Amino acid sequence: MNACRLHSPASVDESPLRWQAVEPPLPGDDEVRVAVSACGICRTDLHVVEGELPPRRSPVIPGHQVVGRIDRLGAGARRFAIGQRVGIAWLHRTCGRCDYCRTGRENLCDDPTFTGWSVDGGYAEYVVAPEAFVYPIPEGFADLDAAPLLCAGIIGFRCLRLSGVGGGARLGLFGFGAAAHVAIQVARHRGMEVYAVTREPRHCDLARRLGAAWAGQRAEQAPKPLDAAILFAPAGELVPAALRILKKGGVVVLGGIHMSPIPPMDYSLLYQERVIRSVANNTRADGEDFLRVAAEIPIRTEIQVFPLEAANQALQALKHDRVQGAAVLRVR
């Protein structure tokens, strides 16, 4: 099969992914093999490729927003049928034994593996995954449109859950890329008033088009205080900026796996029971619940499509804010 492999982390501007022919993987006993049709490009992929997340496998095939059809079953796999359309997300496998797994918090598992980081992912024609961690894709979504739902969508959904706010709340979204452009649709569906902070004017335009009450480039320009804010941009300097426009008792949710340093700040920004909390990975329940909601709304993703062999160029476009909505690799 053909795949884009990372042999050594480097700046994406150096095009570190190599287009190579490699042996297609074979599924283990409890696994399925998926013939990949589309794979979303995620900012986490950028962190893997550039080494901001330390290597766990080398070489590795990145990519964890995979949509395709099952073409081979492991000897013990019974959940899906050959030809069924499925999705593969970031969480590849958990131990099932630690305190976190046993108490419904498998996203915090002590011994997890992750698609496209610790095991090979979806920048390839085939990928394998445990059948228990694979999602059926609802009807109504084309393969390319469904791909961003598998991480941008699921993580955005978990961030909304952990914000603790509902209908009538004022919610801020900092950074308006793949995750935010999905999360705003869930938030608006639930009756929230959304304020978007993003440095790109065209991203402001997209936020308004998707129902934002206000969109601007600087947080202090927001016309009203917020009940909660979600930071999708991996910029630590935005944490105090979000706290400054947060109401008493409000929550700032950090939605990324990596972030630049948070600068020193005065305690007064946290006082009055304001909270900062991170989001780590997702549970399978998050994915199942989100895909059901996505089909009900229905979510409409805005995508920019690249061929698989152009994965380096897609990551460069993401890094330099040249992607409107989500970037997706067309595999077949």
Image (cartoon, grey):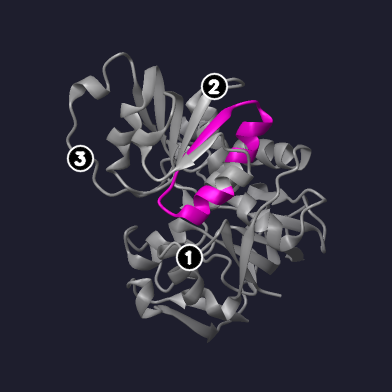
Tell me the residue that label 2 is attached to: 169
Check disc 1 and give the amino acid type: Arg
Q: Which mark is residue 322?
A: 1
Q: Name which of mark 2 and mark 1 comes first in the sequence.
A: 2
What secondary structure is found at the residue carrying circle 3? loop
Q: State the separation of the CA atoms marked 2 and 1.
A: 31 Å
**Placement of the N terminus among the 4 image quadrants:** bottom right
Q: Counting residues from the N terminus, which is met first, the one under dot 1 or under dot 3? A: 3
Figure quadrant of residue 237:
top left
The residue identified by callout 3 is: 263
Q: Is residue 253 above or below residue 304?
A: above
The Cα–Cα distance between marks 1 and 3, rounded to whole angstroms, is 27 Å
1 or 3: mark nearer the eye: 1
125 to the left or right of 267: right
Part of the protein shown in magenta:
184-206
Q: Residue at x 52, y 45 (%)?
A: 94
Q: Residues within 10 Å of mark 2 (few under 14, many from 20)?
A: some
Residue 155, percent from left and from top: 53, 43
